[in-house]
């Protein structure tokens, strides 16, 4: 996009989230609201934020185009979903029905369900079909205000099929308005058709897959599921050590059903530890001393009927908390980030400032991104316009109030106006 100036406004309220700390608890009084505000953009980035009247004077001097809004709108940064599995094929509606009828995970797995069911369905389709499915889900996310989306592999579970998934994510990114951030989750579970043990599988992935990921620039991030049903702390250690040697960032599926993963995340200086529904006071204290970001996934708790991650305790301990959707076909099929974040806020007694920070700049930090999640000069011009005169209405409606406009890199990509 050319570096042309554009002013948009006035917004009844604008919440920039500028100046808020990266870690710990927040109060709504910490939010700085700008009334009758405007955004002055230069190409893909924000040039200035302030009152619309003041920015009009600067816009005139710069020869900027002006978009004048009529009615009440609240302007928020574009949302960042730091944990999704939207690259997949098939449905696991049967799993959901069986789970709600009282069947156990083992029962469902024996009946042909679980992660392996999605692996089987994802392996059957072409790279192009997989990219199309991913693009469609990303487009839905964008319409709901999510302008940056992390996307994991993990339903291939072989060198060739994991490459197919990550190439599909890269292809989808080229056609998506939202930014897709790929993550390699080849260490999701030990594939049922693998002839060796967990250590052999992880060694094969690191030796044969990691070099290609770098060569084709498919991802900078390596994830693993550390759990009794997946990989142990000891099994994953050499894998993460090798990933760090290649220069990958680490993130971890941690402490979902049992503890251990968060300690691994801390030891490997992971960007984030995601899930944490089972985390204990001991692990919380350790995380508070680290720079690892906690990522709560309320969608999985809703889908599985399990307790939420202890978001209130994590924040009060001084930890940085992001909130992500975990959109996947098994445990979190809803995929509505704003709805899930609002529900988590109600159950965990989170302030609006904490919830909004968790789906904007703190979520961006979990992806190693510092150029989005706030409305400030130099940041990407990613923002949402909600049709209301009060920002509190957004979480109050628990996801039912959708953006009237979604702007990505200075361009309106979705509008109902």
Image: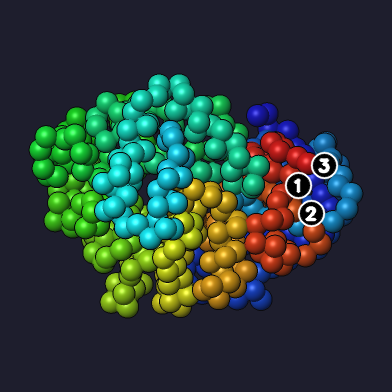
The residue under label 1 is: 404
Q: Residues within 10 Å of mark 2 (few under 14, many from 20)?
A: many
Q: Are marks 2 and 1 in contact (CB under 8 Å)?
A: yes
Q: In the rendered view of the protein, which quadrant contains the C terminus?
A: top right
Q: Is residue 237 left or right of residue 95?
A: left
In percent of the image, x 67 and y 48: which residue is there?
A: 383
Considering depth in this image, is 371 or 296 the residue closer to the camera?
296
Task: State the residue position of label 2.
Answer: 387
Disc number for residue 417: 3
The spot of residue 67 in percent (x, y) is 83, 41
Marks 2 and 3, how far apart in space? 10 Å
- Nearest the eye: 265 or 16: 265
Q: Given the current orientation, which residue lies at the most extreme right position?
A: 70
Q: Quick one: label 1 or label 3, which is nearer the N terminus? A: 1
**Coordinates of residue 175 in the picture (x, y in percent):** 56, 27
Q: Residues within 10 Å of mark 1 (few under 14, many from 20)?
A: some
126 vs 377, left or right, is left
Identify the residue shown where x is 40% and y is 48%. Answer: 95
Mark found first going from the N terminus, 2 or 1: 2
Discs 1, 3 touching: Cβ within 8 Å:
yes
**Disc 2 or 3, which lies upstream in sequence?**
2
Q: Is residue 51 visible?
A: no
């Amino acid at each position: 996009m050319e570096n042309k100036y554009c002013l948009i406004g006035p917004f009844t309220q604008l919440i920039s989230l500028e100046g808020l700390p990266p870690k710990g608890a927040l109060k709504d009084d910490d939010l700085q609201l700008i009334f009758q505000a405007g955004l002055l953009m230069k190409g893909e980035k924000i040039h200035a934020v302030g009152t619309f009247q003041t920015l009009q004077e600067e816009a005139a001097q710069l020869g900027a185009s002006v978009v004048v809004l009529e009615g009440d709108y609240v302007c928020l940064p574009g949302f960042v979903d730091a944990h999704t599995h939207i690259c997949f094929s098939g449905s696991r509606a049967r799993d959901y029905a069986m789970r709600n009828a009282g069947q156990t995970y083992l029962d469902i797995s024996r009946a042909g369900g679980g992660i392996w069911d999605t692996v089987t369905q994802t392996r059957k389709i072409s790279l192009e079909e997989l990219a199309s499915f991913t693009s469609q889900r990303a487009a839905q996310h964008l319409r709901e205000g999510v302008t940056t989306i992390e996307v994991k592999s993990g339903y291939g579970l072989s060198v060739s099929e994991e490459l197919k998934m990550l190439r599909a994510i890269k292809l989808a990114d080229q056609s998506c308005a939202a930014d897709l951030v790929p993550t390699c989750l080849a260490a999701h579970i030990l594939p049922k058709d693998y002839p060796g043990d967990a250590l052999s599988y992880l060694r094969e992935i690191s030796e044969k897959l990691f070099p290609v990921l770098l060569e084709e620039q498919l991802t900078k991030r390596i994830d693993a599921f550390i759990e009794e049903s997946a990989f142990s702390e000891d099994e994953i250690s050499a894998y993460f050590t090798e990933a760090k040697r290649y220069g990958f960032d680490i993130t971890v599926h941690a402490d979902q059903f049992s503890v251990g993963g968060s300690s691994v995340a801390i030891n490997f200086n992971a960007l984030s530890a995601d899930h944490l529904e089972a985390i204990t006071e001991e692990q919380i204290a350790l995380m508070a001393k680290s720079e690892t970001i906690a990522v709560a996934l309320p969608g999985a708790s809703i889908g599985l009927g399990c307790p939420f991650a202890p978001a209130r305790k994590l924040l009060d301990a001084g930890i940085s908390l992001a909130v992500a959707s975990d959109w996947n076909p098994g445990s979190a099929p809803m995929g509505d980030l704003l709805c899930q974040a609002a529900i988590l806020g109600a159950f965990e007694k989170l302030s609006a400032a904490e919830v909004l920070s968790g789906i904007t700049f703190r979520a961006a930090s979990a992806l190693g991104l510092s150029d989005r999640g706030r409305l400030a000069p130099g940041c990407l011009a990613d923002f949402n316009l909600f049709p209301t005169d009060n920002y509190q209405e957004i979480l109050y409606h628990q996801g039912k109030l959708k953006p009237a406009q979604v702007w990505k890199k200075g361009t309106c990509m979705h509008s109902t106006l």
